[in-house]
Image (tube, rainbow, N blue to C red):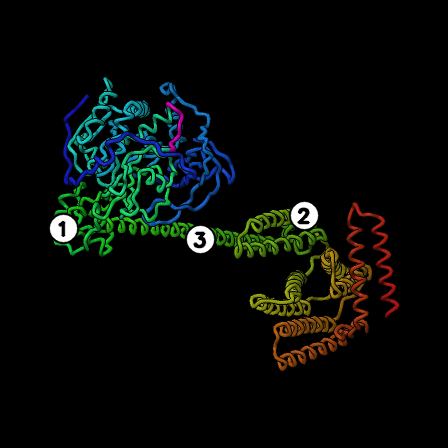
Amino acid sequence: MTSLNVWDIHGGIHPPECKELSNRTPIQRPPLPARLVVPLVQHLGAPAEPCVTLGERVLKGQKIAEAAGFVSAPVHAPTSGTVSFIGPQPYPHVSGMLSAAIVIDSDGQDEWIELQPQPHYRAVQPDQLLEQIRQAGISGLGGAGFPTAVKLNGPPSREIRALIINGTECEPYITADDRLMREKANELVAGIEILAHLIQPEQVLIGIEDNKPEAIEAVRTAVGDRRFMVKVFPTKYPSGGEKQLIQILTGEEVPSGGLPADIGMLCQNVGTCVAIHDAVLLGKPLISRITTLTGEALARPMNVEALIGTPVADLLAFAGLDAARLNRLIMGGPMMGYTLPSMDVPLIKTTNCLLASTLTELPPPPPALPCIRCGECAEACPASLLPQQLHFFALGQEHEQLKAYNLFDCIECGACAYVCPSSIPLVQYYRAAKGEIRELEQKQQKAEHSKQRFELRQERLRRAEEQKEADRKARAERAAKAKAAQAEASSIPNQDDPVARVQAQKAGLSEQQKKLKIEASMAQVALKKAEKQLAIHATPELEAQVAELRTASASAQKALDEAAGPAEASPAAPPANDEAAKKAKIEAAMLRAQVRKLEKLDARDADQDAELSRLLAQLTEAEKTLATLQDTTPATPANPANDDAAKKAKIEAAMLRAQVRKLEKLETRDVDQEAELSRLRSQLSQAELAPATPRENKPAAKTQDDEALKKAKIELAMKRAELKKAEKAGAEEAQLSKLRDALASAEQALHDAEAQSGKPAPGLVRTDKQPIDEQTRTLKTEVAFARADLRKLERDDNGDPAAIERAQARLSDAERKLQEHT
């Protein structure tokens, strides 16, 4: 069925066609190349990902690369052979850059895989049929190479009213579609029927220019009585553009920045339709295409059906290339094609023409002159743009103006540059401007994404800070309410009220209640410390630790509250000063433990030194407060004093026991660690015996002497730490001498404080460490290692008894040698 109801487009040109060079002979098949280079990027979208390995033998039609996304297409082996390389290879692009490819060394057998044709495709679900087209790796063979399956899988909200088949082939020299329509008209119509079955359009329009009479007649004959409309229209360049062809055949225009699907249109190239026929009815993937070999530098211009990946040099040699006459090798036509920097590049799915031109055939353009504002470019533009304005905006990099003047509606057909009397390369300016705008938009998108991430993080931190502040206020309110309730309960003289009696008993806690109160306090302190670390360095481990500590703190507080409920009235409540003194002791003990932990570090940074100074200052204040409270605390009977002494001894023993266990867990210890372990064990033994000996209350002077002794110990530890730090930092001798004098003064002050404390003579031997000879040090080290090995074997449940005996013998021998030497 033929219709002459066609429309014209704005602009357009009529360059010399030069199609008679290659359309006179049938499609040829070149020899099988020995080496095929199959690029992974032959389509718009994400590159395919290899699914074969080096050295693997592949068959013709086997998938060698998977689609890497929705807008992507798989790649198949064009022939059987061995994969010899996977990596960068020459690629047909104006930049001459390399691109990832799979190299196959042909075995000459051209052995196919087992094909799976679908002759009864009408009984197959559309999704399965679409997936078969997708897996065949078909992309548009007429230009940009957009994956066909993606184009066919449009949104359900957009119904396709017209399926338009593009057989225009308007660019000069190219005759691939012309010969295809002549020789494969039946396959073309069968492919159109598959597309019509998939999308169910209201009408199917086949557009062909009137300079292809043989192709028109062949297509009309193949269409027969089908409801396909073959529309023939006058030859004009660039009527083969997608938007221009829609306007010619239907009279409708695609809106600026829109797609044909926006107005219910879908365009497919005639080569794509034949590829769909091969994929569905024959089960063959897209591994070859028809390409025009033309130009006056070729002895035999022709059209060939060549395998994807065939080197361009092999095809030109097959067409009789005269290298001496070759001036430019263009992939594509003279209007929209680009010069290839090398003949080592392979044939890809979008290669419709190789133009080997001579110097007289396509002479270089003359130098560009200034624009004379003649307006010829605007008359020739098929998209009704203003090319001269776009040129000026591109020169000035006025990107907003370029977008306002619809730069991206330009199809880069080259009509404006063809008619320009000043020979200005307008298309190159437009391409460069488009690239700059796309790059800037990508940067803006990244910046916007980073901004959103930053704002979300700030909002998250703000909510966390508000939650912390709310929790703090809630704790303060609960504490204030509890304090007010306690004060109110203590002011009520009614002793018969059990609630009042319990409130009055809080000042005199039982042993169990005191123990639970200490545990709750320690759990709360540990929780606060962990929360502080979590605020500085948020990690999943710290979050889990904080959660566990919160649970433990809540359990300890609950146990304390339950123990406080049923308690009976104690005989006599201790004064308030005793409670304050106990709290001060606990706080001082915790500060002292933190100070010792920092002092044990061999090398401290500036933050740790500042933390140590802050803790020492807090410790001094805590000890002053404790001394003041102890001075103002009246003497208690003997038994309570002994109880307090026993509790203190228990706490001290527990702390010593923890330090001993920590050192014992070390698999190997040096001499200093062994000495420290021995000292801690001695102190632990004394602390464990202390609760059994009743002690009377110390006088106030004795307490002051003890406080002076503690201060002297702290001062000595600080001086010793400063000297070690200076020695490790390589300080000057004058500074080291000054620090040694300060250390000696601190040692003397400690001796004086110990003398005033009334401690026995062995307690004074602390800082005067006598040097030992090297043999003694070696023997002590051997004893320490032997003891460590023995304990390690003893802790092993599956330890060898013989090995334990050998370790015991080794320890005995080492101790004997040390004793004999000393």
Region rendered in magenta: 281-287
Q: Is residue 534 magenta?
A: no
Q: Is residue 283 magenta?
A: yes
Do the numbered discs 1 and 3 sit on residues whose CB atoms are within 8 Å? no
The secondary element bearing badge 1 is classed as: loop
- Nearest the viewer among 648 and 370 is 370
Dot 3 amino acid type: Arg
Residue found at the very far left of the displayed protein: 374
Horizontal and vertical percent position of residue 136 = 39, 30
Dot 1 amino acid type: Pro
Task: Say whether residue 136 is left or right of residue 299.
Answer: right
Horizontal and vertical percent position of residue 228 = 23, 22
- Nearest the viewer among 55 and 136 is 55
- The residue that appears at 19% across and 30% down in the rendered structure is 249
Q: Earlier in the sequence, mark 3 or mark 2?
A: 3
Residue at numbered disc 1: 421
Residue at numbered disc 2: 563
Magenta span: predominant SS is: loop
Quarter of the image containing the N terminus?
top left
Dot 2 amino acid type: Ala
Horizontal and vertical percent position of residue 438 = 31, 49
Quarter of the image containing the C terminus?
bottom right
Front of the two marks 2 and 1: 1
Residue 619's label in the rendered image is: none
Q: Earlier in the sequence, mark 2 or mark 1?
A: 1
Residue at numbered disc 3: 462
- Nearest the viewer among 273 and 707 is 273
Task: Say whether residue 220 is left or right of residue 57.
Answer: left
Residue found at the very far bottom of the displayed protein: 734
